[in-house]
Image: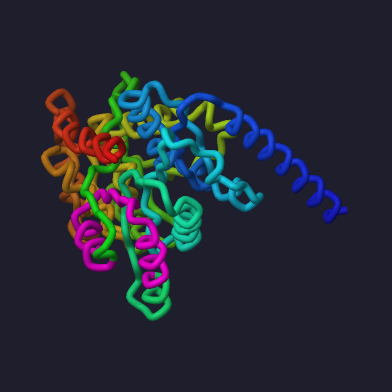
Amino acid sequence: MSSIKQVVKIMLLKFIYLKKYIYIKLSRSKKFFIFVSPNANRNVGDLAILEAEYNFINKYFSDYKIIEINNYDLDYGWNIEKLCRESDIITINGGGFLGTLWLGEELNVQKVIQAYKNRKIITFPQTIYYDNDQKSQAVCRGARNVYESNNNFIIHVRERESEQIGHELFPNTEIVLCPDIVLSLRMESTFEGNRHGICLCLRNDCEKTNDYLEDLMEVMDKTHMDFDISDMITKTRNLIVNRKKEIQKKVDEFAAHELVITDRLHAMVFCAISRTPCLVLVSKSYKVQGVYEWLKECDYIKLINGTENIENEIKDMISLKRDILEFNNSTLDAYYEKLEEKICNE
């Protein structure tokens, strides 16, 4: 019975992707392709990346129709090169998946590049991360060969560490520094009540560095502070429709607290947007520290190396007055304008 269900599921998926393929093929509009991981809809940070990319495209390329493509489309045998006209734009979703940390996503990027060897392909701001072992070196060599097979592949990176690593590992590929695209969002918290307690929002995946939660629970127990435990994963369905709503809900959740303690990059960014004091703990990837550099002028966002002195850090951050907290991301607009130029230039 399970095998019959699997066959039916595959046939249904083939029908859905064929319908999508025909729609794109027949469309006469100029198209702006974004290659997106099918896993991107599970994480509110990834939803924010997509929302910010849509806003960017609608601002600078309002006459283009946005088309999301994922690796399932490729796996079902699309001849995607024939879908694109000369006037269409091809991009890869931003995030933190170039390298070995999320190897499946890296291989999907390579699949896109190989399918479009003769076309310009641009990534939205990414993190490049490779482990220091032989397997990772082999993956890097393979990535270099694929990247260099397309002279028009341009990688935008969101931290200086990735910029340096990109130049070292991929000397023949253009590497451009640009802030995380979520920092371009013009959003504010809609929460208007009194802030209360502490929100702990911590990783539980391959980017987890330390068991911060255990240490923080000891501190909460010792100091009798009220706290909630949260994460960045969503179970809401139909996120194409509800994406902005889910982002706003998470921003407001953080804003309802006096302080957020996190090791998640976009939890930090959401705190900046909602003017919520935030203590940021380092994670396995340097992306948190790197993106923090774009926010370090925000007095209410503070990067710390561990939980050793966290009781005093908590007291200092909670004492900040909400009405003097400011976040101004207009200073980053010049970088996004350069991103638009890179996409437009032949």
How far from the left and from the top, in percent, is residue 66? Answer: 46, 30
Give me the residue at 28% from left, 25% from top.
186
**Quarter occupied by residue 87:** top left
Q: Is 53 on the left or on the right of 176, as rendered?
A: right
Say if residue 229 shows up in the picture: no
Write the residue at 81% across / 46% down: 8
Between 118 and 309, which is closer to the camera in this rendering? 118
State the extent of the magenta-drawn residues as a range: 140-169
| Nearer to me, 92 or 300 | 92
- Visible residue check, residue 45: yes
Image location (x, y in percent) of residue 97: 40, 55
In the rendered image, residue 318, in percent from the top left (x then y), is placed at 19, 38
User: Is 166 contained in the magenta span?
Assistant: yes
The outermost residue toward the right is 1
Rendered view: 232 above or below 62:
below
In the rendered structure, the answer to whether residue 309 lies left or right of residue 259 reads left
Q: Which is more toward the observer, 226 or 79?
A: 79
The quarter in which the C terminus is drawn is top left
